[in-house]
Image: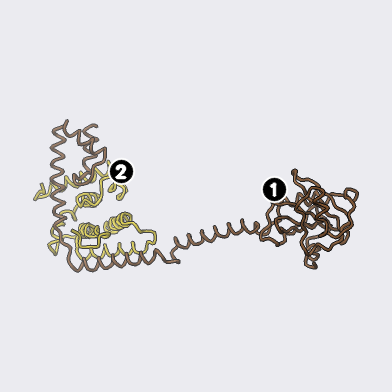
């Protein structure tokens, strides 16, 4: 159950996504906060779905600029480090898919890829995850 | 659907997310290909594991507080913005509304003072009449109602300000099969034309207001509507001359 108001329930997923992209809790909070700041300046956004899409779009764009973290410092950072260290665009694609935040079709639109390209990105991510020293499955 | 296409559709699909028709067809393909089914099951297991790891990440309470407060502030600002007249969208709606009101006002209040084109046609015809085409009538303009009734023109009306002009001749002519009463007034070499505006598509609003125009380079006409009839004065002269003449009365 989300701890945010109903229309902002996606913020929990947004923060987790930001955590995967930045590798640091503080940086994830700053990233989401910055994206919310950009959203607040848009006078034409009233629907939750458009807000959510814009917020994730900003997170994708800005989060990709974050440096890769070598050593996690908190349990949350530790939990997602295996995703954080994946290369882009596979990292964003597989994280958003597994968060269940978007359907495949929506995700392809958000990341600016065709569905076959998105499928390849996610396949690459899955292959890398399976090849880890302690495989996930 | 071929296994290759099915694999592509299933690769970007989570079982928890509602299926599209393409994904449903891809699932049917799974039954025909044990290798594809095994691959898909491994994919679902991996995605579930990753998903459960992400679900298990707890948001620190201070993060929830900070981001939540920011989100609530955005919602509050949006609800205020919805009724803010400085909002570009609201401004556009307001301008659109004012424009609509202006267009309606222009339409209903006499097309912004334009002289009706149909009336100019009548004035042009009236100005062509020669003295010998009139019947000799020597009376005041306001006293000719009975004379016109006998000629079959029922709603003759001259505004009070013009009723005292001495008339030298009168007649009726037809435009578009509608009657127009014409008076020849020696003073200031004028013609008075009286006609029912509705059948000819003429409308002067507000009632009693004047529209003045020049035509054929040497004539000027002034028209007004009163008691449902149009009264038009035509002179040989300019708009300025005619305005002065109307004001004089």
What letter labels the chain drawn in brown? Answer: B
What is the x, y in percent for residue B72? 28, 66
A77 or A85, which is in the foreground?
A: A77
Task: Establish if B149 lies above or below A75.
Answer: above
**Badge 1: residue crowd in 10 Å (few <14, some 14–19, many ≥20):** few
What is the x, y in percent for residue B230? 73, 55
**Badge 2: residue crowd in 10 Å (few <14, some 14–19, many ≥20):** few
Do the dots labelled 2 and 1 sit on one chain? no
Q: CA distance from mark 2 to mark 1?
A: 66 Å
Left or right: B43, with B143 as reference point: left
Disc 1 target residue: B199
Q: Classify residue B186 by image quadrant.
A: bottom right
Q: Which residue is at 32% across, 64% downward? A: B75
Q: How is the image coloured?
A: by chain
Q: Which residue is at 65% across, 57% downward? A: B110
Left or right: A116, with B104 as reference point: left
Label 2 SS: loop
Location of the N terminus of chain A (image quadrant): bottom left
Subunit ID for the residue under disc 1: B
Any part of residue A71 in sight: no
Disc 2 target residue: A114
Residue B17's disc number? none
Label 1 SS: helix
Subunit ID for the residue under disc 2: A
Viewer-nearest of discs 2 and 1: 1
What is the x, y in percent for residue B208? 70, 62
Any part of residue A75 in sight: yes
Q: Colour of chain A?
A: yellow
């Amino acid at each position: 159950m989300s701890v945010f108001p109903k229309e902002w329930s996606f913020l929990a997923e947004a923060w987790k996504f930001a955590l995967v992209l930045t590798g640091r809790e503080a940086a994830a909070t700053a990233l989401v906060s910055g994206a919310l700041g950009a959203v607040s300046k848009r006078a034409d956004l009233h629907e939750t779905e458009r807000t959510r899409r814009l917020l994730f779009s900003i997170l994708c764009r800005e989060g990709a600029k974050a440096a890769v973290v070598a050593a996690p410092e908190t349990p949350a950072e530790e939990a997602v480090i295996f995703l954080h260290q994946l290369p882009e665009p596979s990292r964003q694609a597989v994280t958003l898919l597994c968060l269940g935040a978007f359907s495949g079709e929506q995700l392809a639109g958000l990341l600016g890829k065709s569905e076959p390209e998105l499928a390849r990105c996610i396949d690459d991510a899955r292959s890398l995850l399976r090849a880890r020293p302690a495989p996930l499955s | 659907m071929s296994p290759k296409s099915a694999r592509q559709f299933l690769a970007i699909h989570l079982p928890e997310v509602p299926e599209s028709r393409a994904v449903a067809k891809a699932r049917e393909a799974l039954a025909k290909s044990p290798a594809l089914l095994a691959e898909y099951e491994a994919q679902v297991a991996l995605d579930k594991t990753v998903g459960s790891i992400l679900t298990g990440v707890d948001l620190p309470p201070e993060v929830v507080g900070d981001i939540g407060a920011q989100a609530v502030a955005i919602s509050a600002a949006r609800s205020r913005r919805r009724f803010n007249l400085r909002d570009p969208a609201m401004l556009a709606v307001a301008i659109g509304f004012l424009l609509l009101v202006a267009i309606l006002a222009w339409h209903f209040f006499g097309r912004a003072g334009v002289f009706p084109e149909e009336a100019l046609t009548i004035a042009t015809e009236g100005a062509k009449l020669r003295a010998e085409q009139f019947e000799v009538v020597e009376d005041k303009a306001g006293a000719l109602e009975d004379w016109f009734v006998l000629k079959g023109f029922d709603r003759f009306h001259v505004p009070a300000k013009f009723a005292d002009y001495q008339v030298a001749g009168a007649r009726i002519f037809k435009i578009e099969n509608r009657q127009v009463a014409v008076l020849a007034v020696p003073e200031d070499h004028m013609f008075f034309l009286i006609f029912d505006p509705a059948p000819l598509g003429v409308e002067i609003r507000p009632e009693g207001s004047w529209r003045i125009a020049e035509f054929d380079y040497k004539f000027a006409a002034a028209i007004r509507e009163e008691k449902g009839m149009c009264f038009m004065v035509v002179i040989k002269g300019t708009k300025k001359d005619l305005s002065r003449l109307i004001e004089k009365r």
